[in-house]
Each structure stands twice: as C-alpha cells, then as structure tokens.
Image (cartoon, rainbow, N blue to C red):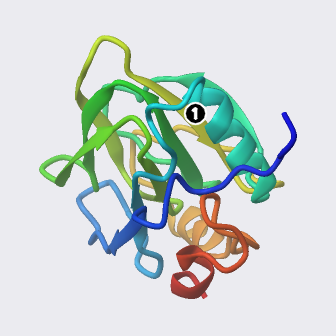
Amino acid sequence: MADQTVSLASKTARCEHFMLPPNGWVPNNSRLPVLLWRGAIDPKSTDCAARFEALFEQNGWPPQWRNGVFDYHHFHSTAHEALGIASGDAELILGGPHGRAIALSAGDALILPAGTGHCLLTAGRRFQVVGAYPPGQQWNIRRDAITDQERIAMEALPFPRSDPVAGEDGPLTRLWR
C-alpha cells in the first residue's frame, strides 16, 4: 500500500454535535458535546475495522478493542471514548434511560465525552465497533452514580490533542476547548 495515510471517506462526511443533560445517575458531560460523524469512512471499503483502527491511531486515539456496545446503560468516568462503526447498523440510546436514540451505520463514528451514558437498543447481525481512547486514559464501566470527587476528577480529564476522525484541526479541538 503506497499511501499509509487514512482519511475521511469524502468531503461529504459531516460532524453533528449536541449536549446531553444529566439524567438521574448518569452524569453525561456538562461542558463537552457528543460528536457524531456520519460517513467518517467509506463503508464499502475493505476491512472497515482496520481502517478505523488506523484512522484513530493516526489521530492520537489508540484503538483498544473490536466488539459491540453493551446492552445496558453505562458510562465511562475515567476516559473519553471514540466508537467507529466497522460493520452493520444499530440503534443506541445516549444520555441514560429515556435519553436520545441514535441510528448508526457502518462508516459512522461517535465521540463520547467522559460521563456520557450509552446503551445498545438494537443491532443488525454483523454489528461491530472499534473502540479507542486518548493516550493515558483508562476506561471504566459505571452503572451507578459517581461521587462528588469522581465528578471533579471526570471533569478534570485532559482534552485530547486531536479529533479521532479529523485530526488536529477537527471539530473536537474547537468544540472541546
């Protein structure tokens, strides 16, 4: 392969962003929006999982796993998370019980700031996700409220240096500062 650089599928890839309010025991993130990339990579290309891994790695978010999304409400209080939809499609609920339902398809990417609740509602047969995190951040799985000290630590997590999809000049670097 002559070009080792991974890039967006096309100039038509778009990034949406939105805030989620606290929801019971799910804190969400009061300062940082969720980012939703539609068409981050071309879903028709070969081995989308490997392409997401390369894209995330190139942009400073080391990939850590390939799997699905848990079918119970949870959040990570110790790490921000990037999810690349490598195959299939699914519907997730973000923000905790009765939160915002989001339909995702192969090629989409989701960037969740620490504290953002997420849960799998439905998935197609071949649904696979690549998960990545900023360097030095170790994810945990929370299914209950956090203490005031844990909330302070969560809100003090360092900002990633780059957007896992678009790099140093991506929307994350503007919206999360």
Q: Position of residue 135 (x, y in %)?
A: 81, 55
| The residue positioned farthest toward the front in the image shown | 2
Residue 77 left/right relative to 94: right
Q: Give the residue displayed 24% in from the left and 58% down from the top.
A: 24
Name the one closer to the observer, 142 or 44. Answer: 44
Q: Position of residue 93 (x, y in %)?
A: 23, 45
Residue 40 left/right relative to 6: left
Relative height, residue 4 to residue 85 (above, below): below
Residue 125 in which image quadrant: top left
Q: Position of residue 119 (x, y in %)?
A: 31, 37
Residue 21 in which image quadrant: bottom left
Classify the position of the N terminus by image quarter: top right
Q: Give the residue displayed 64% in from the left and 59% down from the top.
A: 164
Q: Secondary structure at mark 1?
A: strand
Q: Amino acid at mark 1?
A: Val
Q: Position of residue 22 (x, y in %)?
A: 29, 68
Relative height, residue 158 to residue 24 (above, below): below
Classify the position of the C terminus by image quarter: bottom right
Residue 83 left/right relative to 28: right
Number of labels in the image equals: 1
Q: Give the residue displayed 77% in from the left and 45% down from the top.
A: 62
Residue pointed to by mark 1: 130
Name the one closer to the observer, 29 or 135. Answer: 135
Name the one closer to the observer, 74 or 161. Answer: 161
Name the one closer to the observer, 40 or 140. Answer: 40
Relative height, residue 123 to residue 7 (above, below): above
Residue 20 left/right relative to 74: left
| The residue positioned farthest toward the left in the image shown | 98
Residue 29 in which image quadrant: bottom left
For label 1, the crowd category at 10 Å Cα-Cα, with few meaning under 14, some 14 to 19 and many 20 or more, is many
Relative height, residue 168 to residue 48 (above, below): below
